Image: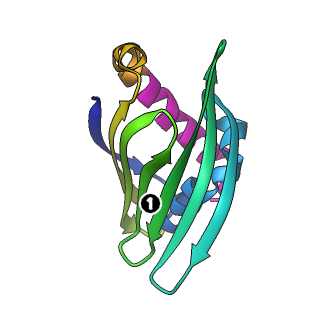
Amino acid sequence: MPVKKIVKKFNYSKKDLAELVLKIDDYKFFLPWCINSKILTIDKNKKDLKIIADLEIGFKSFREIYTSEVIYNNQDSKIEVTSINGNIKKLLNIWEFEEIDKNSCNVIFFIDIELKNPIINILFNKFFNYGFEKILNSFEQRAKETIKS
């Protein structure tokens, strides 16, 4: 059951980075191993935004679709992701954005994940750190390509 927490400084506003993370429909264009991404529903109120979305993850002949609930609390600048359907037994993924100044912020990224299939989970654990770094780097690269400075 991999658990990881990092803090990384980005030279973008916390608003811009939160919006990038919430553009789930775009994940298929830049996220490693993401074959398809689709927002199913969006529910917005004054306090938060709730998104239900599907991600199709694949590598070679392995493909899996899982559904997640994404809650963005604008007041706390926090995105919390949990799995609600698919091959993930447990998922807690939190993005927190702490403003440094109007053009930079620290991103605190936390993930706790476990897959339902014990054999695939063992393989997943072995490659978790590599995958984690690759995914985080892809968000950073996407920010460089899409956020206006």
Residue 103 horizontal/vertical position (percent): 49, 64
Name the residue at 50% across, 87% down.
46
Which of the two residues, 61 or 73, is positioned nearer the viewer here?
Answer: 61
Query: Residue tagged by mark 1?
Result: 104
Name the residue at 45% across, 75% down.
74
The prevailing secondary structure element of the residues shown in magenta is: helix
- Say whether residue 140 is left or right of residue 128: right
Whether residue 9 is visible, yes or no, is yes
Element marked by disc 1: strand
Residue 126 horizontal/vertical position (percent): 35, 14
Which of the two residues, 12 or 111, is positioned nearer the viewer here?
Answer: 111
> What amino acid type is highlighted by mark number 1?
Ser
Residue 131 versus residue 144 in the image, above or below: above
Number of labels in the image equals: 1
Quadrant of the snapshot with the N terminus: top left
Residue 80 horizontal/vertical position (percent): 40, 58
Q: Classify 10 Å Cα crowding around label 1: few (below 14), some (14-19), many (20 and above).
A: some
Residue 7 magenta: no
Quadrant of the snapshot with the C terminus: bottom right
Residue 30 versus residue 109 in the image, above or below: above
Residue 134 magenta: yes
- Say whether residue 34 is left or right of residue 18: right
Whether residue 148 is visible, yes or no, is no
Name the residue at 37% across, 53% down.
94
What residue range appears in magenta? 131-149
Name the residue at 57% across, 63% down.
51
Question: Coloring scheme of the render?
Answer: rainbow
Residue 146 horizontal/vertical position (percent): 69, 51
